[in-house]
Image: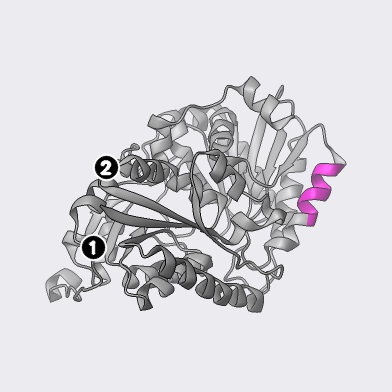
Amino acid sequence: MRRIAVFTGTRAEYGLLYWLMKDIQSHPELELRLVAGAVHLSPEFGSTWEAIIDDGFTIDAKVEMLLSSDSRVGIAKSMGLGVIGIADALERLAPDALVILGDRFEALAAAQTALVMNIPIVHLHGGEVTEGAYDDAIRHAITKMASLHCVAAEPYRQRVIQMGERPERVLNVGALGLDHLTRSPRMTRQVLAKSLNFSLDAPYLLVTYHPVTLADEPPVESFRALLGALDRWPDHKIILTYPNADNGGRAIVPLLEAYAARQPERVLAVPSLGFQRYLSAVAEADAVVGNSSSGLIEVPSFGVPTVNIGQRQSGRLAADSVLHCAAEEAAIDAGVRRVLAPSFRDKCRHASNPYGQGHAAEQIIEALVTQPLNTLKSFHDLSVSAAL
């Protein structure tokens, strides 16, 4: 019996981990230990730990780490608190491995803690590139701390190998979030509207915008540009989800709430949709607008267009259903206009998703059962010809 700890710090990453955790929970050779922290425990961001319990999981350790400040100093201090809390949790739970998904600051806190405690790290979604956020550096740092890698596409597998990881320890399993396509029921439009207590009797845009953490200026101006562009589409309703807890995210929230309050019949602001409502909302949306990774990874599988704003996701693989635009009002408006054109929407219905077809969890489970779980690893040098 292998004891597998899974760390989750945000609503989005929890939604991606859901089916993997269910499969660990039910596997006769694996034992799930769940560590939840950061945004999950914050009332400001919807206390999403409660949804984890509602989904039938036991939270084995709660790690309070998120300060009310989202300044650079505040985020760094939150990481420090995370290291302390995660260290206590891992010492008590004594897992055989720790599963970490992605590239956020709380994931880095978990990874560096496991590293010095000699707990093998299984890293999901390594090898990707997002040039507009410091998440990019965090992701690569976790790769070098991890012992086993489950990546979302073959170019990402090659990149992880390029970073010195042994090929047999780098598995291309596809994007874990796509497992929802084959395994999760979705709400009808009517049921979704009732769940949101918001009428969906008109076409709508699903909007999520996060700070660009490598930018020197706060995200307020680019978010105002987004709101200005949305005003140009008065016949479309708007479902607007809150930003994450990155640097400057809290500066967006008052603007978002005021925007929704001015036109409550047209705009709904939601701290957290949860993965079932989110994917149900994607399936019924005219388009997904913003700069969330889900717009590039999960949304194309629904045949729904994405308007990806700005530099946050720059460098990430994208399907033909994704349209990139600058973080300027006119550019966003033009992007929405283009993706809503019948010719573009038809292209979306036939777009191929580079992140797989939704069978990642079963491959990760096989790796957790069969692969050696240890922290010993050697640097895999590429030949000169391969490097060139």
Task: Return the mark for residue 28.
Answer: 2
Q: Is residue 321 left or right of residue 236?
A: left
- Label 1 to label 2: alpha-carbon separation: 18 Å
In the image, what residue occupies the spot 69% across and 49% down? 330
The answer to which image quadrant residue 169 occupies is: bottom left
The answer to which image quadrant residue 137 occupies is: bottom left
Task: Return the mark for residue 245.
Answer: none
Residue 340 appears anywhere in the view: no
In the image, what residue occupies the spot 35% across and 37% down? 358
Query: Where is residue 144 drawn, in percent x and y?
Result: 32, 72
What kind of residue is marked 2? Answer: Pro
In the image, what residue occupies the spot 37% across and 46% down? 175
SS at mark 2 in the image:
loop
| Dot 1 crowding, Cα within 10 Å, few <14, some 14–19, many 20+ | some
Question: Magenta segment range?
Answer: 254-261
> So how many labels did they put on this image?
2
In this orientation, which residue lies closer to the viewer: 48 or 177? 48
Q: Is residue 132 above or below residue 76?
A: above
Q: Is residue 255 magenta?
A: yes
In this orientation, which residue lies closer to the viewer: 149 or 248? 149
Query: Where is residue 346 drawn, in percent x and y?
Result: 47, 27
Q: Quadrant of the C terminus?
A: bottom left
Task: Return the mark for residue 373.
Answer: 1
